[in-house]
Image (tube, grey):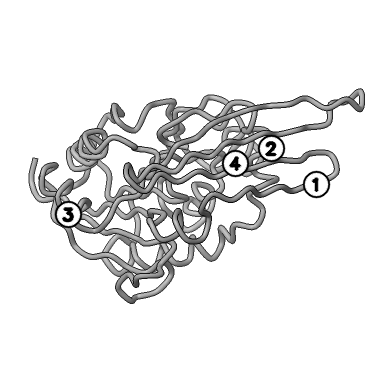
Amino acid sequence: MGGQAYTGFAELYDEFMDNVPYEEWCDYLVSLLHHYGCMDGIVLELGCGTGSLTELLSDRGYDMIGIDMSEDMLGIAMEKRAESGQNILYLHQDMREFELYGTVAAVVSICDSMNYLTEPDDFVQTLKLVNNYLDPGGYFIFDLNTRFKYEEVMGNRTIAEDRGDAAFIWENEFDGETGLNTYHLTLFAEDEDGRYSRFDEEHVQRAYNIEEIRDAAAKAGMRFVTAYDAFTAEPPKPDSERIYIVLQEQGK
């Protein structure tokens, strides 16, 4: 998504992510945007992937810009745009170095794209850019997988799934000292001739706690507004698997 490039996985991403209730995620995100006064205008999505959420936000009336560093993922997003006719601008950029022509009303990032920023300095740098490109007083809303999820839910587990024409083996490895979670992905996809192609990928994410996020926001010149247990209006709990963070622009 945002911090690393999907290659062989791009063509299969939507198939294996069909358990993600994007409509419900969009409803929640839009409720937060409305709560913080962003009813319309230009919204930037960092780590937009194949554009599933980008399309939904465009449907809700936002002028969408999507940024991702994977050309393959963006290629699929553009195919969706061609089918839907939505006026979405997609940019092939790294979220740590992104550039826009002007400011935006809000920035969003979901599906743990920010967890891919495994270096705290990169996290801060991304927040600095977000702050720079937000309208005065604008908001950045993003989600994060929690340490609890990496450590207790995913742990050092192996997940496998066979979809007939495609299959994957997903191995998780969490390092409690560094807070890094490594996904080892092996994918098998059926070709037109009935043979299977194999793709091997490795993705690394970092767990950030609330204090680390507060510190990063302060270093980036942003105001830490609040944190939510995902899909609720409640604060994070010790067993929250996903949290949402709200930061605000407070001067360049």
Q: Nearer the viewer, mark 3 or mark 2?
A: 3
| Callout 1: SS | loop
Q: Which residue is mark 2?
A: 12
Give the quarter of the image for residue 46.
top left
Which amino acid type is marked by label 2? Leu
Which amino acid type is marked by label 1? Arg
Q: Which residue is mark 1?
A: 163
Q: Nearer the viewer, mark 2 or mark 1?
A: 1
The residue lying toward the viewer, choosing from 221 and 27, is: 221
- Which label's residue is closer to the chain start, 2 or 1? 2
Say which residue appears at 22% left-offset and 41% top-offset: 127
- Which label's residue is closer to the chain start, 4 or 2? 2
The residue lying toward the viewer, choosing from 26 and 245, is: 245
Q: Which residue is mark 3?
A: 214
Cα separation, mark 1 vs mark 4, equals 30 Å
Cα separation, mark 2 vs mark 1, equals 11 Å
Q: Nearer the viewer, mark 4 or mark 2?
A: 2
Say which residue appears at 14% left-offset and 50% top-offset: 215
**147 horizontally vs 123: left or right:** right
Q: Position of residue 164 (x, y in %)?
A: 85, 44
